[in-house]
Image (tube, rainbow, N blue to C red):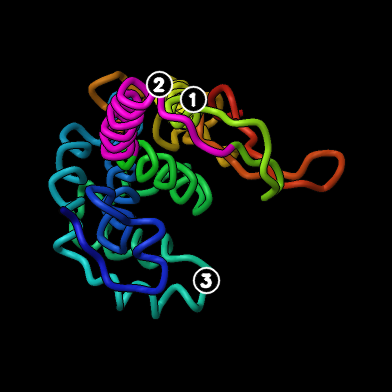
């Protein structure tokens, strides 16, 4: 079981889910490495630059606390991370680090990587919970209990029916999470900043950061001012 210390660790990092500093840092580095590989493939970085950046993009080589202190100057940890990663690669590969990307590209892509990686553990937990609920529904299909509505006693039901309701809710959550995992989330290679005038910089499947998007997911406001996901589809304009 993965354990973390922190105010929200029990909420966002239970069981096998990793959502702490190291998970976020590695996800940001994976996004940067995938971008470097895509740049090399597009002819916008030196041969071997993608591999060089990927080799350096190991979270254990960076200090999250130091990056966090520097993040206070820019509002997010991506600029200091990009500088540190640039310093960690050979000089001839430095131009492949963060080229054509914005901080939001890296952060949003990292968020989707953290979420997708967490979904493995969450789906396993949901499968266990569904099996337990199904067992209760079968074992107690004839077990009578008081029905309640708004905390008031109502028509009797069976405990098996209640457990079946839990199973239905769990199955709906599993289907929703499976739909999320089926979405195509790929690293940030489609920034409006562009990676070159009129040049496309798509990622091959093997170059991706562990997910398959149609573009980095941006948070945006709808017409009524509510926050919601907005996917930037297509390549650099």
Nearest to the observer: residue 112 or residue 168:
168
- Tell whether position 132 is magenta: yes
Q: Residue 181: image x %, image y %?
A: 40, 26
Q: How far apart are marks 2 and 1 (CA)?
A: 7 Å
Residue 170 appearing in the image: no
Element type at marker 1?
helix
Q: Name the residue under label 2.
A: 141
Q: Name the residue under label 1.
A: 161
Magenta stretch, overall SS: helix
Q: How far apart are marks 1 and 3 (CA)?
A: 54 Å
Quadrant of residue 155 within the rendered picture? top right
N-terminal of the pair, mark 1 or mark 3, is 3
Quadrant of residue 210 within the rendered picture? top left
N-terminal of the pair, mark 2 or mark 1, is 2
Asked whether disc 3 touches disc 2, contact meaning CB atoms under 8 Å apart, the reply is: no
Q: Residue 1: image x %, image y %?
A: 15, 53
Asked whether disc 2 touches disc 1, contact meaning CB atoms under 8 Å apart, the reply is: yes
Label of residue 74 in the image: 3
| Label 2 Cα crowd, 10 Å radius (few <14 / some 14-19 / many 20+) | some
- Tell whether position 47 is magenta: no
Q: Residue 32: image x %, image y %?
A: 33, 45
Q: How many marks?
A: 3
Q: What residue is drawn where x is 45% and y is 21%?
A: 175
Report the magenta residues as a range: 119-146
| Label 1 Cα crowd, 10 Å radius (few <14 / some 14-19 / many 20+) | some
Element type at marker 3?
helix
Q: What residue is drawn where x is 27% and y is 58%?
A: 86
Q: What residue is drawn where x is 57% and y is 41%?
A: 193
| Label 3 Cα crowd, 10 Å radius (few <14 / some 14-19 / many 20+) | few
Q: Quadrant of the C terminus?
A: top right
Say if 160 sits above or below 1 in the image: above
């Amino acid at each position: 079981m993965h354990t973390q210390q922190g105010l929200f660790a029990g909420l966002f990092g239970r069981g096998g889910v990793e959502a702490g500093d190291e998970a976020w840092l590695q996800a940001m580095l994976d996004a940067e490495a995938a971008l470097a590989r895509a740049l090399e493939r597009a002819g916008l970085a030196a041969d071997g630059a993608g591999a060089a950046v990927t080799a350096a993009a190991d979270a254990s080589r960076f200090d999250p606390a130091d990056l966090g202190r520097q993040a206070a100057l820019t509002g997010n940890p991506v600029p200091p991370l990009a500088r540190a990663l640039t310093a960690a690669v050979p000089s001839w590969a430095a131009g492949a680090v963060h080229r054509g990307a914005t901080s939001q590209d890296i952060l949003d892509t990292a968020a989707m990587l953290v979420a997708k990686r967490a979904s493995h553990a969450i789906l396993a937990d949901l499968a266990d919970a569904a099996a337990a609920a199904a067992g209760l529904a079968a074992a107690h299909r004839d077990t009578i209990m008081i029905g309640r509505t708004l905390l008031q006693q109502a028509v009797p039901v069976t405990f098996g029916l209640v457990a079946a309701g839990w199973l239905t809710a769990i199955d709906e959550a599993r289907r929703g999470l499976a739909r999320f995992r089926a979405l195509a989330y790929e690293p940030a290679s489609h920034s409006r900043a562009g990676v070159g005038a009129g040049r496309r910089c798509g990622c091959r499947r093997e170059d991706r950061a562990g997910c398959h998007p149609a573009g980095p997911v941006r948070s945006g406001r709808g017409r009524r001012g509510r926050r919601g996901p907005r996917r930037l589809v297509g390549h650099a304009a």
